[in-house]
Amino acid sequence: MTLDLAQFHDTFFAESFEALDSMENALLKLSAGDADLELVNTIFRVAHSIKGGAATFGFTDVAAFTHTLETLLDQLRAGKRRVDAKLVDTLLRSCDLMREMLGATQHKQPMDKARVSALHAEIELIMAMPGDSPAIAVPAPPATAAVAPAAAPAQLPPGETRSGWRIHFVPGPKLLRHGNDPLRLLRELATLAPCEVRVDAKWIPPLTELDPEECRLSWHIEVNGPVRESAIKAVFDWVEGECDLKLEAFGPAPDATVMVPALSMPEAQQLAVTPPVVEEPPTLAPVAPTIDESLAPRNNAASTQAAAAAASATSLPSAAAGDGGSIRVSIEKIDELLNSVGELVITQSVLSQLAATLEGHDAEELRNALGQLERHMRNLQESVMRVRMLPISFVFNRFPRLVRDLGQRLGKKIELRLSGDTTELDKTVLEKIGDPLVHLVRNAIDHGIETPEVRLAAGKPAHGVIELSAYHKGGNVIVEVRDDGGGLKRDRILAKARERGLAGADEELSEDRVFNLIFAPGFSTADVVSDVSGRGVGMDVVKRNINELGGHVQIHSTTGKGSMVRIRLPLTLAILDGQLARVGSEVYVVPIVSIVETIQVREEQVSSVASRAQVFRLRDDYLPIVRLYDLFGIEPQHTDLLDGLLMIVEADGKRVGLFVDELMSQQQVVIKSLETNFRPVVGLAGATMLGDGRVALILDVPGVISRFQSQETRRASAQEAA
Amino acid sequence: MKALAYMTGSEARDSRQFLTFRLGGEEYGVGILTVREIRGWSPVTAIPHAPAWLLGVINLRGVLVPIIDLRVKFKLERADFNEFTVVIILNVGERVVGIVVDAVSDVITLASADIKSAPHLGNQADTSHILGFGTLDQRMRILMDVERLLASADLRAADTANN
């Protein structure tokens, strides 16, 4: 039976990348001095399951590298090696490399082999060093490799060698269905030592009863070579529980039923320098079966490994995330659910409207029942919405690494504090907020936090602090990036702005206005352009990205004390707070976030410029008037400005007065895209279903303004032509 | 037995089912597999600056579905929409669109031998969206290629009104 493994590739890659993230997290915690065994186990599990998966799918490069890494991690796990900064650094780089290798494999691109083997060699070198005293100079790996096997047998009492194993392997009938191939196991076994395999076909039923998907064969295998029992068990790791496995040692051994072989120190090191790829090298010295004091912890380790293997075989993501009980669901399914719930809400409100007109005793009961229904519907809608929400830790998690690396590179000591990382945000918002946040944090490290010397001179602790926090506030999520560095240099920003003509020469600007200048495109006050920041691209992009999400950015800064960037984000992009406005028979939804105020126009406030264009005076500003009926070509109720209402809306710093017939209710609306079945329309952000089942269009204020401007330009040129 | 099964198989392969509908005195057909549902006319929400053949969008169980007036598309006289007016909701590729027709008639099965390709009418009429003509019981139906029809309807075209 050949199974098309390619269909599992995507899952493997997705899970591996996730697992690598958790490995990175664990490593960063390790580097903080937290030598928790659970952390080491997490790291080991990741390497182990990636190795297993990669080997199954035939990604030999990845498997080979992970194998070596796993061996090193195994030493950590067994307590043979202490965790130090250098080791964590190497492991972090291995993590990056694995990510790259997996990425390259996924996209079928070539990988820089030299870098892989360089790091590979580095890991082997580390392993060649005696675990407890890594500072001692050690000969190059090949030399060690040559020495170790020779030394090892001397350590073992003669007569305790084994010359091989008899294995009786009876796979369960469902083994094949679970994607395991006994042939692969046999081949893997053959890499350990020469094997003699006899197949036992006596359980095969007559042809008429034969189910090709069931495995009815069993095997007698003789492994002719000194191989450790754990090595053999490791081969059968993936089928554990699905087969009947009997191991029996043969050869000149006194004890034929070894549970777990005890491993002496020299052997472990020797193991480490032998070539990777194979599960356990065949050149391995025979194992001493004596049960000494090292057995107990080893036994422990072996069972952890078995547990880890079992866990990774069944549910890698939950093992990696450390929180059980989650499933992977595609976003489309959730959106479908959301749609259905939205429809239910509409149907329910139609029912309520109908019931409101009924009379009599039964009608009252019906209304009560409908009132209950409404409450349940609202709960249901909220729950479904919450399914799309993810904790902001998904974004925050990348920062410990970033801060550590960048701090090291710039010679700055930085402590990162994260708070509120369980605050939940819509997945779409979350995906788009990552890059702006990275930019802000990099800026804080590069421009904000000073070098330790400068900080000490200023009477501040040498360690700078960057604080990332997230919390809920009034239906929004606030994310703050705070540093205790030098703060924004107001004078310098102002000088630069004047130089670039962004501010008048003797114009006095408020604090806020000055700080907002740094969001202007191409603005940078950095003296030196580094590869980290200072090129002046970025802050404008940050602001644009956040505005696109319907959010706001604010900057506060005190010279010498530090700066704080506060980002306000909507909880979700699927729902919008809207003001319903009527024009003729059409109802439009205006995002509340863009509305400044709504006023009834008095005659003296309006003046005509040239022949057509009308402007409206709002305190000290003159605003153009956009007649929505004219722009959208619909029949209005009022054409006289004095009869309707003027909604002052703002986008990209531009304000216009939007003329509508009347305002209706304010409500939260679910945004539906016009693009799904039609195409994007300038001036419209989408549409939504109203309570009565009608479709109302949602205005996109920047689009409305630009549409208005181009229409005016066209009219002006048409007039000139005429 | 075997031979018979083969025969039916080949027959099924060589014939197609069409949903036929009336529009301005003519009878048209669309492949039954593209039809998602048939519903009565309900008011639409007009989209500003949309082409004339796009009546607007409706809410179909939480999905916005554009509704196309085939009469405009085929340059027929406009008709009043009443309770007999029918909207056929079609799956076109990844999208869902609705077409307004006068009435739905029948589901017919046509053998491929009964489907004649559209004659080239030169400038007289655009036949690019016509799959062919099918004759059954002496009556001719114009079979539409929905994908092509809506490609020419150009749903995806850029919003040119702004430029």
Image: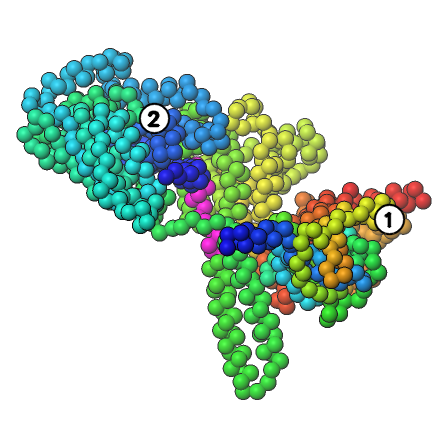
Image point (73%, 55%), residue name: B134
Pick the quarter of the image with the C terminus of chain A: top right
Mark 2, secondary structure of its residue: helix
Q: Nearer the viewer, residue B85 or A522?
A: B85
Dividing the picture into quadrants, the one containing residue A89 is: top left
Q: Is residue A643 magenta?
A: no
Q: Nearer the viewer, residue A521 or A459?
A: A521
Q: Give the alpha-carbon distance from disc 1 to disc 2, as whole Å.
A: 70 Å
Q: Quick check: A171 left or right of A417?
A: left
Amino acid carrying mark 1 in the image: Gln
Which mark, by number, is residue A494?
none
- Which subunit holds the residue at mark 1? B
Residue where numbered disc 1 is placed: B124
Magenta residues (range): A385-399
Q: Is residue A387 magenta?
A: yes
Q: Quick check: B48 left or right of A135?
A: right
- Residue B46 pos. (x, y %): 73, 58
